Image (tube, coloured by chain):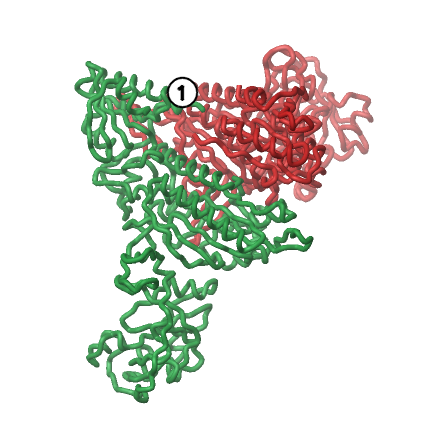
Chain colours: A red, B green
Amino acid sequence: MVNAPVQRMSQLMAKTLRDDPADAEVLSHKLLVRAGYVRRTAAGIWTWLPLGKKVLANVERIVREEMDAIGGQEVLLPALLPREPYEATGRWDEYGPELFRLQDRKGGDYLLGPTHEEIFTLIVKDQASSYKDLPVILYQIQTKFRDEARPRAGILRGREFLMKDSYSFDLADEGLAESYALHRVAYQRIFQRLGLDYRICAATAGAMGGSKSEEFLAPAGAGEDTFADCPSCDFAANTEAIAYELKPVDAADVPASEEIPTPDTPTIETLAASLGVPASATLKNLLVKVDGEIVAIGVPGDREVDMGKVEAHFAPAAVELVTADDFTDRPDLVRGYVGPQGLEKVRYIADPRVAPGTSWITGANKEHTHAKNVVAGRDFEVDAYVDVVVVQEGDPCPNCGAGLKLDRAIEIGHIFQLGRKYADALKLDVLGQNGKPVRVTMGSYGVGVSRAVAALAEQTADEHGLCWPKEVAPADVHVVAAGKALQIELALDVSQKLAAAGVRVLVDDRAGVSPGVKFTDAELIGVPQILVAGRRSAEGVLELKDRRTGEREELTVDEAIARLTA
Amino acid sequence: MVNAPVQRMSQLMAKTLRDDPADAEVLSHKLLVRAGYVRRTAAGIWTWLPLGKKVLANVERIVREEMDAIGGQEVLLPALLPREPYEATGRWDEYGPELFRLQDRKGGDYLLGPTHEEIFTLIVKDQASSYKDLPVILYQIQTKFRDEARPRAGILRGREFLMKDSYSFDLADEGLAESYALHRVAYQRIFQRLGLDYRICAATAGAMGGSKSEEFLAPAGAGEDTFADCPSCDFAANTEAIAYELKPVDAADVPASEEIPTPDTPTIETLAASLGVPASATLKNLLVKVDGEIVAIGVPGDREVDMGKVEAHFAPAAVELVTADDFTDRPDLVRGYVGPQGLEKVRYIADPRVAPGTSWITGANKEHTHAKNVVAGRDFEVDAYVDVVVVQEGDPCPNCGAGLKLDRAIEIGHIFQLGRKYADALKLDVLGQNGKPVRVTMGSYGVGVSRAVAALAEQTADEHGLCWPKEVAPADVHVVAAGKALQIELALDVSQKLAAAGVRVLVDDRAGVSPGVKFTDAELIGVPQILVAGRRSAEGVLELKDRRTGEREELTVDEAIARLTA
């Protein structure tokens, strides 16, 4: 183990900026750029400058240690991957435009790996032949590529990013459950060591396939995910994963449905106002196209449709909203007055809140006309019940019924029980104990390594700048020479001594830069301890300041070294 | 620092093979696959299995420490790069089909970085504004992509590979020379610590541009480079970089040239045989197309043209051999009977051995006819002298004249003084001490990190398999349980104790695998020390074997631990 050299600000490529970059919307983006940690190379594509690279390497190290601790074996797969295995599992097409595709000089099709299920499956197929070779957990810390439609939020959602992805291979469901549990524990340790505040939430599996999955969400205003947190029990879930229970009601007393004239009421708002009823008494029918086929989706009039849930339900089919042209092609669909009753040739999906027996005011499929007392299961049939509404603050907790609290969060980890989807597609079997082939079952697990840096920045920054937890900080101490030659000499001297003792040191030895600028930069850069060589430098006395609490204390050189190596 | 867990062969994804892979031509390819270090994912694209990843990480660590030691600052740039900066320097086109190009979902042009001169230049342009910000050395250890026409030799020449690339930025030529010298020292330390036998050789700069460059070549039969080594002085150079001095001779006594009938002598061999002269008396004229223009290259008849030298001379223009169609289009060029005298409209390049005053037998530009006493500078003009012949064993050393010795070698490092090519193209200036802008001068430096693993395998393997130097080996000791439960228990026990003492341990704890197979695997895998729990396990006595020398010694558990932690 070689001690890291002292990093000198006079030489370091870490130019701080006083102003936020013009295109920055979120805190981590602003601060990581301003403090000289990262620079944008292209949309969603980032360069890690020296301080940023150090933080990234620290996160990487923690992830590696905890993956090793659960018996994970580190490997390194290529980023440039051949088409064939992704063709075999269907993902070459399913992935859509998010997949970077390219051809080599011979016209062969390749992709830049977004995740590596296929290749890991093939590796285990090559390496494992018997039940004795399993279970196994393989992982890598590697650059991934996804052509996001709207790269945003700095490194929170990039098109090239660093990820730890791992894959478990087991003979049976119980084994998969164990591998999954091991990852759950490893992830808890990782995020705890990183100093991240996080919640483990039930999640939809998205495009990965598979049954059980949980997300590790770090609450932050900049997050793209919304999660629901129950104030009364331990329930927490991505709102996309919350499904309302289907509760049929008795409709025996509901009169027959009848049409009512409702001139100029093509929206729920105009309809509810005109009839003097709450929006919740009406049934809203949203039309979408699923791989080109028109599908109607029914939800209570006071609820919004969560397109993420709709897409997850129909995946891998592509979901689009209908356009004016679609209405022209289909005169049976009367814009603003669609109702499920008597709607021919249109598949009808409904939210569980539109349970059998519930009664609604809805479109009558005629201009300026609605119908009332339209009862689900009596006046119209639902082809499938799918919870597609946007969860709202105060919706009942599926576990205990208390009103849910909603928060924004960043997805920092995701664990999936994939099952046999990839093993089936690529025919991954091993010989079982009885001599017969056993189809292997898999899990897939990811930590956003570069994203975790941004999540940490979001959660730990204060009004002065970044403020890193010790294990991930780019240095243990930021030594500031607040003065001229005398202070610079003392700062460099104490820095060398600290480095020799194994302390990671960043020293601001810039000549001709005022103490004020140096203090501001130190706060912005966010190393946990700031050691100032200032007015009492001639006596060999320094001031040690805690970046987070602001607590200060005067110490001699020896005391400072003792304190910082403790 | 967390101690690495014991790696257990019973669980490790490291399947050894008894036979060489069918497509393997070189030793490192065969052994790294057979010993379970790497697997092929696609042509020239490799997966690093756990043992391989450990070796790779060790090489990476050594490179990082030595780059830090010369003040290098580690950064991490993206692999996916926008076209524009490469367009500005001309490399978008110059790179040809070796560059992987792709488009994003919006049709924007991107490339996968083969080297990163452009982006580093832009980073320094963003970060450095004054002479005070320089000099600086930035480096990264990163995956690179090059679409090699013929990926071969396993990981020696892959299309995706790990490289340390660094770039120096200086105000003046003296500074560049210093940064270059620092890298030269760092590279010497790196290759020495890796345990590589290497030579520093003068080199052509290839497509990088720039003036001074040296290669670090590791002698190995599998190498693609040929280097010349002088047995009498310290001269060593890539043969592509050796240029014969131009020595004009006096041609006053040479009679006038005259045509001689030479029926059916379209080759040097047939001509020399027919005339009874040595091939060295004849002048061979090779026709090539340089960006479509036909150029003739004259060399003595007994020498071969080195197309690498020709390509380097004309770079970035593309060089091709002429085809039969070209002769059809140009009746003035008589195939097999081309001579430089009276050759109109063809640029003529000659080797310095065809110096002014030298006299030759060469084609007369007529069927079945040659000319003799054709004197360079008298009977024909040379447009440019370029050393383009293949250096041969025994050619004179340019330094002392002794006969050169030729060897094959692997290029493991390369250092370049680039100068201002990139700074000019991207307008990288800083404010000088006098307040005026100074154009920055650059160096670029590379170590093939994954290639170094293959070079080490090539140089250190013996007839039993791989045989790693200590610092890069995937473990310090390979503990073999040569027996049943008793031996496995002892092997695991001593492994745990060694690991607790900071020793990196691989233990062969496989049940049902014979001691013979385990010994063979241990030799193949090549960990430097092999510790065997065998017949005397009941007494707690193990055998320690040095993998390279084969020396053995019996030790108690405590002695073994003391020895291995010494």
Q: Quadrant of the N terminus of chain A?
A: top left
Which residue corresponds to the image point at 37% horizontal and 25% vertical from the top-left?
A136
Left or right: B294 in relation to A556: left
Which of the chains bears the disc numbered 1? A
In this view, B480 is above or below B30 = above
Which of B397 and A20 lies nearest the eye of the viewer? B397
Which of A357 and A423 lies nearest the eye of the viewer? A423
Let me know if residue A426 appears in the view: no
Which residue corresponds to the image point at 43% horizontal and 36% vertical from the top-left?
B61
Let me know if residue B526 appears in the view: yes
Q: Report x, y in % for residue A469.
A: 58, 24
- The image quadrant of residue A231 is top right
- The image quadrant of residue A241 is top right
Left or right: B58 in relation to A457: left
Secondary structure under tag 1 reads: helix
Q: Report x, y in % for residue B208.
A: 48, 56
Q: Report x, y in % for residue B414.
A: 42, 51
In this view, B340 is above or below A552 = below
Residue picked out by circle 1: A173
Which of A16 and A172 lies nearest the eye of the viewer? A16
Q: Report x, y in % for residue A92.
A: 47, 41
Which of A190 and A385 lies nearest the eye of the viewer? A190
The amino acid on which the numbered mark 1 sits, given as a three-letter code, is Asp
Left or right: A335 in relation to B195: right
Left or right: A328 in relation to A422: right
- How would you rate the neighbour count of disc 1 (Cα within 10 Å): few for under 14, some for 14-19, many for 20 or more? some
- The image quadrant of residue A468 is top right
Which residue corresponds to the image point at 59% horizontal and 47% vertical from the top-left?
B134
